[in-house]
Image: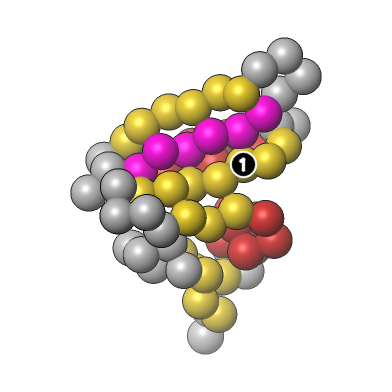
Amino acid sequence: MSYFISGKDSVAIIGKKVLRIHEALEEARYMDQRGMTNISIQDNAGHTIDGNDLLACINGEKALSDDLRAHCVS
């Protein structure tokens, strides 16, 4: 499955396509560290994660499943 990560900086919307979920999360983390906003991940099945759920996954507070759902870490 492929994943498309996008985020907005002060100039444009930036996007990147990767093949693995952990790569998508790493790219989203990188975008967050660069100060980008409106970060989201979408897969080719139409699932999307963004907002507070994605930020919780980036920060390790929640786990990200292959279908882009945020789950509590136990």
Q: Position of residue 33 (x, y in %)?
A: 68, 35
> Is residue 7 highlighted in magenta?
yes
The location of residue 73, given as percent across then percent down, is 53, 78
| Residue 13 visible somewhere in the drawing | yes
Q: Which amino acid, by three-letter code, is at mark 1?
A: Ile
- Quick check: is 28 in the magenta stretch? no
**For residue 72, side relative to residue 9 (left or right):** left
Q: Main secondary structure of the magenta part?
A: strand
Stretch of the chain drawn in magenta:
3-8
Toward the left, the furthest residue is: 1
Residue 68 location (% of width, % of height): 43, 62
- Whether 55 is drawn above or below 28: the answer is below
Is residue 20 something that shows in the picture?
no
Q: Residue furthest bottom?
A: 74
Label 1 secondary element = strand
| Relative image position of residue 12 (x, y in whole percent) | 66, 17
Q: Quadrant of residue 23?
A: top left
Residue 59, placed above or below residue 70: above
The residue that mark 1 highlights is: 39
Residue at figure coordinates x 61%, y 24% from the top left? 13
- Please report the residue visible at 47 percent of the width from the left and 38 percent of the height from the top: 5
